[in-house]
Amino acid sequence: MSSQESAGGTKRKIWSMDPPPPPKKRSFAEMGKKVGQNKDHDFGGRALGDMKDSDEFAFLTYAACPTFTKEHKSLMSKTLTPELFEKLKNKKTSSGYTLSNCIQTGVETPHLGVGCTAGDEESFEVFKELLYPVISGWHGGYDAYTQIHPTDLEPSHVIFSDAQKAKFNAYVASTRIRAARNIRGYPLPAGSTPETAAAVEGLLKKTFMGLEGDLKGKYYPLGGMSPEDEQSLQDQGFLFQKPKTTNLLTNAGAARFWPDSRGIFHNENKTALCWCNEEDHCRIISMEDGGDVKAVFALFCALSEAMKASAEGAGAALMHSPALGYIGTCPSNLGTGMRASVMIKLPCLNDHVALLEQVCDAFDLQPRGSAGEHSAAVGAKWDVSNKQRIGFSEVQLAQKMIDGVSKVIEIEEKLAAGASVESIETSLGALRSSL
């Protein structure tokens, strides 16, 4: 039995002894609405049937270097010349990741700041003539051709005075430190297949089972989560959201076959979390209410070392190189892969967002809205973090965040006391040199 729709829009049943024929496979052009292409502008990409395509997503191929517009903000768009495009356009990694795959998110999502992604560890070698200049531009001139990335996961090396702690607790609602960790030998989410993503999840589940003591906890698969668990994790702000077309993940292809092989782990105290197969294979996260950055950093270091040991015990190695440090999907998350952030209330600077951005830039900080990148600051609460990830150790970046946010608080208090925006702008150079 099957049903057909009549001209009037109602369905009527028809009986048949034979099963209906299988649906005809339609081309991308016929389907027309696959995610991956900018809905408002044609930048030249064509869906030609990439082996990594999914039912809802089409990877695009660019026959020529895209014509970037004034809306394109990314370092990729400023680096990729027609000459460089021609040199790299036919190259691909052993997992099948191409230059077109690499640049798609930045071409089709013009507002992004980085604009390119890696589909596997090999991408950073095959496309390094594009990626290394982007890394340098994002990370303050870091030269991946010549520099070695330092590591320091010793919390006692961080300087955070009692006076700073008291000041942070007066302004900061919560502190969070996270980093990307990826498993060697498997494509990254932007270049994965359902099979490789499932294999990564399996290895991570073994890794989570190996965590002990204060880090012992439970893994919740996103696809098989009970409504009660999902609501609880959402209410606590732990559960990652399905990517939107405005962020890096969607047009990079990292949101394909959602929510399969994704999930979240957290310890019993809910201060240590791990996300599986979001932007990276794993995001490790330490978090607490209040502004005790040093305590949160100490937990982060413990989680990082435990994850490494547990992964190795499960037969896995992490993606890492002397020049690039820990390797991730986005060039913004290399090196330490670490983002140390505070959710801080800044009512005066919130009235002068351009000044806030200028101040944060002066101290190598990155401000985001309350719900993350490209969101509004609800209640004047801003997520402020270190901008750089590579070329500095974990301790150095935690220190840069502490010192920079201390200056942000100082400026907030000056504005509250009646200082003008112009006087703050004039003093920025001296404030920066005082660090």
Image (cartoon, grey):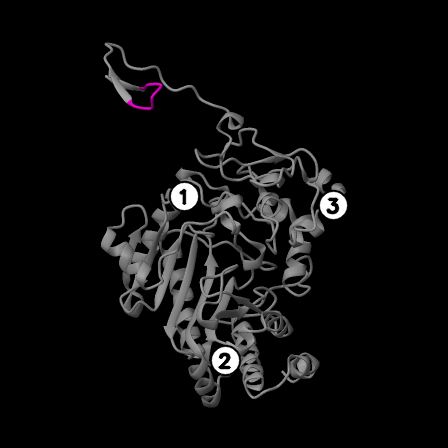
Q: Residue at x 39, y 66 (%)?
A: 303
- Answer whether labels 2 and 3 touch (C-beta < 8 Å): no
Local secondary structure at mark 2: loop
Q: Tell me how far mark 3 sits from mark 1, CA to CA.
A: 33 Å
Residue ID at (68%, 57%): 145
Mark seen at residue 277? none
Q: Which residues are magenta?
A: 5-10
Of the two numbered discs 2 and 3 on the same chain, state the one appearing first in sequence: 3
The image quadrant that residue 354 belongs to is bottom right
Residue 308: give x, y in percent of width and height: 42, 60
Residue beneath disc 2: 158
> Mark 1: which secondary structure?
helix
Amino acid type, callout 3:
Thr
Indicate which label's residue lies in the foreground, 3 or 1: 3
Q: Is label 3 in a helix, a strand or a loop?
A: loop
The answer to whether residue 7 is magenta is yes
Nearest to the eye among marks 2 and 3: give it.
3
Residue 253 image offset from top left, x and y in percent: 50, 42
Residue that mark 1 sits on: 197
- Look at the image and tell me in which quarter the C terminus lies: bottom right
Q: Within 10 Å of the Cα at label 2, are there few (<14), some (14-19), or many (20+) other Cα atoms?
A: many
Tell me the kind of residue under disc 1: Ala
**Amino acid type indicated by mark 2:** Val
Looking at the picture, does residue 42 appear above or below residue 435?
A: above
161 vs 122, left or right, is left
Which residue is labeled 3 in the image?
A: 81
Cα separation, mark 2 vs mark 3, equals 42 Å
Callout 2–callout 1 Cβ contact below 8 Å: no
